């Protein structure tokens, strides 16, 4: 499953693993934002993005379950 990071500028970094995603994040930060990120900084950003996405999906699932439950009542 691809790892994905969405930048606030609209860019989407996508890779098959954490190392690839960190490299994409570093490249994008350098080329588009003039930021030199270390590998560790890029990994932290990728991990935070993955966690944020997971929390967003869990929230969406909870909302959908609530709506279904309310419709059944």
Image (tube, rainbow, N blue to C red):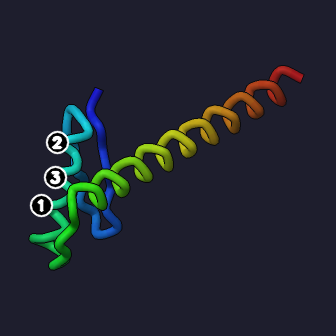
Which residue extends farthest bottom?
34
- Secondary structure at badge 3 equals helix
- The quarter in which the N terminus is drawn is top left
Residue at 26% over, 39% down: 18
Task: Return the x and y of residue 51 as percentages of the image width and height.
Answer: 48, 45
In this picture, is 64 found above or below 25?
above
Secondary-structure class at tag 1: helix
Question: Marks 3 and 1: CB-CB under 8 Å?
Answer: yes
Of 19 and 9, nearer the camera is 19
Q: Taking 9 as reference, is 24 left or right? A: left
State how far apart marks 1 and 2 are (Cα). Answer: 11 Å
Q: Which of the 4 image quadrants contains residue 20?
A: top left
The residue where tag 1 is placed is 27
The residue labelled by disc 3 is 24
In the rendered view, does 21 fall on the left or right side of 27? right
Give the residue at the far top of this rendering.
72
Mark 3–mark 1 distance (CA, rounded to whole Å):
5 Å
Q: Is residue 60 left or right of residue 25?
A: right
């Amino acid at each position: 499953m691809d790892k994905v990071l969405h930048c606030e500028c609209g860019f989407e970094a996508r890779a098959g693993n954490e190392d690839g995603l960190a490299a994409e994040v570093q490249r994008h930060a350098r080329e588009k934002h003039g930021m030199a990120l270390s590998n560790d900084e890029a990994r932290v950003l990728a991990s935070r993005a993955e966690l944020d996405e997971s929390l967003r999906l869990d929230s969406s699932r909870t909302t959908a379950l609530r709506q279904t439950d309310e419709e059944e009542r």
